[in-house]
Image: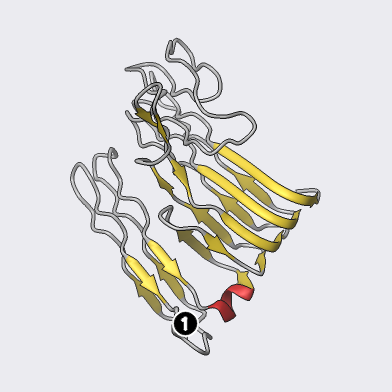
Amino acid sequence: GNGTISANGGYGEYSGGSGGRISFHNVSNYNFIGTVSTLGGEANRGYERGFAGTIVFPQSKLDNFILSNTLRLGGDINYTFGNLTILDGGILELDADPRSNYNSITSLYEGSTSRVFADIINVTSGGTISANYLGFPQTQGPGYYSDLRGGIYASRGTSNTKVTYGDSHAPISLGSGSLDGPGGGAVILNATSIMVGGSILSLGKTESFYNSEGGSGGSIWIISDNLEGNG
């Protein structure tokens, strides 16, 4: 079938509800080609969005997972594939968990996401693995300062005096939001071989109106014996 299976969170004025959970764990023959989603609800005023829930696919689907549409996976569990292929027009979005990765020195949560394990990950031309704008919401994160200052993470934003955070060798933290936009999320890929003909992204939100501030970029951590491609 090509319909919709959804457990999305609801919209709100100031905050959205979280996505739910969907499981196909006990499905023997999974041939569904429609939309599966556990999206978090948006906030009408743009502040505290809900974060995505979880989707558990049957092992037969995970062994050779081919994505040609948009799929957002929540940050509450890890995901293990055999071969993961992102086709032209396919977008795998990795949502975050902002209440994880607690820093006991600063007493702040730095946030993180799920890890994607696979034998082979192939992001073909036109395909994307993305955590764009999926980090800390606007006005949140260790690197949020105040009005008229961009969010920071690994380096300083304009006029922002907050200290940088995270690990340069094992980056898992989320980008911080600004007054006007969220930070980038986190992409953590662990595979024997990774081929990138498309894009792997974790961008902070850019705003172009007068006196606006952008969110900081997020994390991309690639763990692999072999990385190749020209994307």
Q: Residue at x 24, y 45 (%)?
A: 44
Residue 2 vs residue 176, the one in the foreground: 176
Position in image of residue 171 (x %, y %) = 58, 35
Q: Height in image: 230 above or below 164?
A: below
Q: Is residue 101 left or right of residue 42?
A: right
User: Which residue, as the protein is rendered here, is positioned at the far left?
Assistant: 13
Position in image of residue 166 (x %, y %) = 52, 28
Three-letter amino acid code at disc 1? Asn
Residue 126 vs residue 117, the one in the foreground: 117
Q: Residue at x 24, y 39 (%)?
A: 45
Residue 2 vs residue 113, the one in the foreground: 113
Position in image of residue 213 (x %, y %) = 42, 23
Q: Is residue 170 left or right of residue 26?
A: right
User: Which residue, as the protein is rendered here, is positioned at the far bottom?
Assistant: 29
Q: Residue at x 41, y 22 (%)?
A: 105
Residue 153 vs residue 42, the one in the foreground: 153
User: Which residue, as the protein is rendered here, is positioned at the far front?
Assistant: 104
Q: Residue at x 34, y 67 (%)?
A: 21
**SS at circle 1:** loop
Instruction: Say which residue label 1 marks.
Output: 2
Q: Is residue 7 left or right of residue 83?
A: left
Position in image of residue 162 (x %, y %) = 42, 15
Q: Quadrant of residue 80?
A: bottom right
Q: Residues within 10 Å of mark 1 (few under 14, many from 20)?
A: few
Q: Height in image: 88 above or below 43?
A: below
